[in-house]
Image: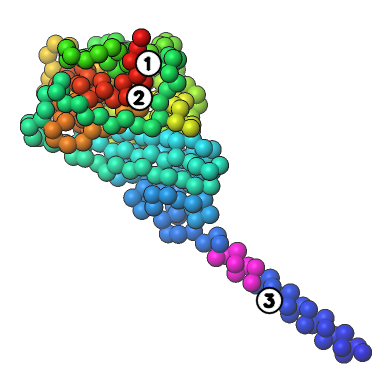
Amino acid sequence: MSRQRNWIASTAAGLSALSACAVAGVAGTAHAAPAWCSGPVLDAGALPEVVDRDACDLRGRVVRAEGGAAVRVPADETSVLAHVLRRDGRSELGVTTERGGSRFRLHREAPEPRRTAAAALAACKDGAFNAGKVTWPKGEAVKWSYHAPPDVDLGVKDPAEAVGRGVKDAFEATTDCEDLGPKPDIEQAYQGTTDREPNIAAAGECGKPDGTSVIGWRNVKGMSDQVLAMTCQWGRGGTAIEGDTAMRAVKDMWWEQGQGTCPKGRYYASAVATHETLHVLGLGHVSGNEHDNLTMSPTVAPCDAGPSTLGKGDYLGLIKLYGERS
């Protein structure tokens, strides 16, 4: 009788051990992360377009695309889109957290090098645009604050005026075209200056949204020297909740006020601000040599004030997103 009890006990112990090993094996398999999921910063080019959280939990992690666009992935059902404007082209990266944080969808645009071809449509004849899926609430003015540059000589006599004029030109759809209709139904509400920097981390990624839209200057040290400006737009359910723009603030960089003469190699601050503000409002780049004269062309040329005034496509894109102002 004693031998039987011992046999039953040892058999039960063996089965328990086998069960524990099986559970451990299953658990180990379930939690084995793919190679592209390792490291402090993930390469957007190596990630699939849709990532399930069970395969790789992106929440709170940094994803960086070729060309420098990078985002810190939101934890809730929030989208974040980074636009990086470079002297040698541009880079974009978007990540949307879906299904309560159980899935992540990536949007990537590879860097597009600066083009030298001059065969482009006239701005007032080019109706191309790229309207995004995230817009500000209609009927409400977008609140934003201005962040002044650090104590460095940017080559701009009045940085606040240059940025403010660029923002206004975007919201008011300032254009040289004579045959366009009413202004878009979206307005700004300037909140004054702020000590808060644009919500773009020193390493060069869109951070966690804080509910305050800031447009201004910042020296984003983690970025390539080719970067002129970066804009981040956050949204929930297709509604924009924040938009931040950092104009690169480096001594003796490439900036010019936007009026009068322009030294070779410099960029009009107001023109870049107009381009970036249209990103805040939901417009993406329009690629192709034939669209080089639109404000939302992927590149901005030195000493070119053209992007300050919207082309036909830029205007139509805003109307598509917001309708006509009554």
Vertical position of residue 51 compared to residue 219: above or below: below
- Residue 140 falls inside the magenta stretch: no
The structure's colour scheme is rainbow
Q: Mark 1 sits on what residue?
A: 186
The CA span between labels 1 and 2 is 9 Å
- Determine which of the numbered discs, if any, sits on residue 321 in the image: 2
Q: Quadrant of the C terminus?
A: top left
Nearer the N terminus, badge 1 or badge 3?
3
The residue sitting at 27% across, 43% down in the picture is 110
Q: Quadrant of residue 19?
A: bottom right
**Dot 1 amino acid type:** Ile
The residue sitting at 7% across, 32% down in the picture is 119
Q: Residues within 10 Å of mark 3 (few under 14, many from 20)?
A: few
Q: Quadrant of residue 299?
A: top left
Name the residue nearer the viewer: 307 or 123: 123
In the structure shown, which secondary structural element does the residue marked by tag 3 occupy?
helix
Nearer the N terminus, badge 3 or badge 2?
3
Name the residue nearer the viewer: 249 or 180: 180
Q: Whole-percent x and y of residue 62?
A: 43, 43
Q: Residues within 10 Å of mark 1 (few under 14, many from 20)?
A: many
Q: In this picture, which residue range is highlighted in magenta?
A: 22-29
Q: Residues within 10 Å of mark 2 (few under 14, many from 20)?
A: many
Nearer the N terminus, badge 1 or badge 2?
1
In the structure shown, which secondary structural element does the residue marked by tag 1 occupy?
loop
Q: Whole-percent x and y of residue 205?
A: 39, 36
Whether residue 253 appears in this view of the structure is: no
Q: Nearer the viewer, mark 3 or mark 2?
A: 2
Q: Quadrant of residue 313?
A: top left
In the structure shown, which secondary structural element does the residue marked by tag 2 occupy?
helix
- Determine which of the numbered discs, if any, sits on residue 254 in the image: none
Q: Whole-percent x and y of residue 289?
A: 13, 35
